[in-house]
Amino acid sequence: MIQIENLSFSYGTQQVLQGVFAEIEDGKITTILGANGSGKSTLLNLLSKNLKQQEGNILLYGEPIADISIKEFAKKVAMVHQKNNAPDDLTVEKLVGYGRLPYTSILQSSLDAESEKQVNRALELTDLTALKERAIGTLSGGQRQRAFIAMALAQNTKYLFLDEPTTFLDVKYQVDILQLVQKLNKEEGITILMVLHDINQAAAYSHQVMGLKDGVVLFKGEPKEVIHQESIYQLYGRKLPVFEVEGNLCVLAIDQEVAVENEMDTTKDIYIEETDTKTKEKTEEQTKEETKEETKEEAEEIQLFAAEATSKPIGRIMRIVFMIVGILALALGSVGVILPMLPTTPFLIVAAICFAKSSEKLNAWFKGTKLYKDNLESFAKKEGMTIATKRRILCSVTVLLGVAAFFMRGTIHGLIALLVVWIAHIIGFGFCVKTKK
């Protein structure tokens, strides 16, 4: 059992969770419902140790999860995120094999017999055995989602957390994923905790649902007991019809108040259609004049667009430059993880700054990596460095780049790359990173 005790969390000054108390019962499927921004994903990330607790406590069988190491925790709880990334050329079997990392050592070059067994089991449970040699990039949306669930299953845990597993999927694949979740719970005894937006799916596939609004639990219990018009109104601010169809709860996503307004609008439309011919003629003349004015406005917009287009190449070139510098800095920072003699954090900070200025997608990907979370997340929260820290980092980087330049003095391209990285550090730490007292 997982117990949540007085859990609170905030991003800076924005309070997301406020004194949450709840229990996740073993052997059941529990679904968290709530509007966007209610704290659902944040709660799931705290429960899976992807976010560090600030206030309150989370207990797994009576033990605070903060006291459990990441490796041991990964043997107890598996997580499938809303957005999952993997190289397109990676095979399904290789991806699923990554789920065995908590059970392998650094010196182990291949999976042992038990890990092979768990990988094959995960492929069978998700019906992916026939696709195990396929590359991830060739899979459909539903197959891709099943592949990431299979990787989580390879961890062989008692708990499986799913953050919006049906997002971006059509109805067929949504049902396939939810039936798989139900199968894993019934046949494998896995306790499931997931976040869904579809109230009907939550009611049909869950033993319990939890309603979260503004970081506070409004209700928790069996779907038929807690899902009704009043609770839906409290959760989403909409009066939606709730009824049963063949014993199953059904929530119709039509606001009853809006429906009444639409009826009034229809009456008005009928009245307008019965206006006399003279009014129609005047309207047609006004429409012609408005069309002429719109044509002029469109011509002006086209001219403005053409003017803006001439300035875009400069911005594009700068984005490419920032992207190249960011990739170089990321490469050097990654090497620093393996070779402690290189300063990891300074290079990663430069990479973060360059990615933020060059590409939103690249920036979002980088922030989701383990490198960022391990080395830069605390810095990102502080949003600044002292002048002494800046000076120390820049001096160490200058010395290291100078040594590298000495050994690369015969390679002009290498020297140019080192110079670009050095300049990027000077600009990044001197002007982009805030100075704290």
Image (cartoon, helix red, strand yellow):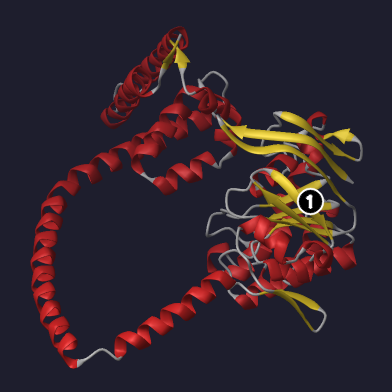
Out of 219 and 68, give the one closest to the viewer.
219
Res. 276 image quadrant: bottom left
Query: Residue drawn 35% across and 34% down?
Result: 325
Q: Is residue 310 left or right of residue 247?
A: left
Residue 86 drawn at (x, y percent): 57, 54
- Mark 1 — residue? 155
Q: Is residue 311 left or right of residue 85?
A: left
Res. 49 image quadrant: top right
Query: Residue drawn 63% across and 66% down?
Result: 239
Out of 355 and 338, give the one closest to the viewer.
355
Disc 1, SS: loop
Res. 173 image quadrant: bottom right
Q: Is residue 130 visible?
A: no
Image height of 294 relative to 26, above or below: below
Instruction: Bin the neighbour count of mark 1 within 10 Å (Cα to Cα): few under 14, some 14-19, many 20 and up.
Output: many
Image height of 68 relative to 115, above or below: above
Query: Residue drawn 29% across and 43% down?
Result: 320
Please, what is the three-letter code of the amino acid marked with disc 1?
Answer: Gln
